Amino acid sequence: MALYVMLTRLTDQGARTIKQHPEHILEVNTELSEMGVKVLHQWAVLGRYDFVNIVEAEDDAAVARASLELGARGSIRIETLAAMPAEELIGAVK
């Protein structure tokens, strides 16, 4: 399984949704799981992004499908980065 960092920004619509139904944050994790993307860690953050998620998926296509599905709703904008443990990078460059 591949690791990804999903950086999420709420749109105005998304902020209204969270204000009215804060539990929706965790409901999205269940939806991601049903799409084949497992949320390993999730943080609400201050600054440029509203949420940082570390997720696991079979491949780039799976995480791209999930990102597009969620983004198409108009409540969030997602930037997704492929990630690898630092130890893997060290092994790759030796």
Image: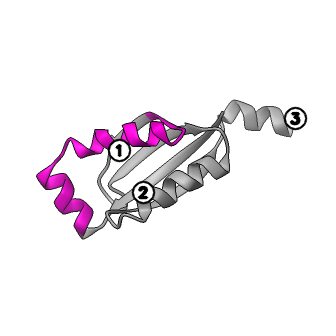
The answer to if 94 sits in the magenta stretch is: no
Amino acid marked by disc 3: Lys
Density class for disc 1 (Cα within 10 Å; few <14, some 14-19, many ≥20) is: few
Q: Quadrant of residue 25?
A: top left
Viewer-side residue, 55 vs 27: 27
- Disc marking residue 70: 2
- Disc marking residue 57: none
Farthest-out residue, front: 34
Q: Is residue 92 above or below residue 49?
A: above
Amino acid marked by disc 2: Leu
Q: Tell me whether the residue at label 1 lies in contact with that at label 2, contact meaning CB atoms closer than 8 angstroms.
A: yes
**For the point 38% across and 37% down, which residue is it?**
30
Give the residue at mark 3: 94
Gap in angstroms between the C-alphas marked 1 and 3: 39 Å
Q: Is residue 75 above or below residue 37?
A: below
Q: Quadrant of the C terminus?
A: top right
Which one is closest to the eye, mark 2 or mark 3? 2
Residue 86 percent coordinates (x, y):
67, 35
Give the residue at mark 1: 28
Circle 1: element type: helix
Range shown magenta: 13-40
Residue 80 percent coordinates (x, y):
54, 55
Residue 44 percent coordinates (x, y):
30, 46
Which one is closest to the eye, mark 1 or mark 3? 1
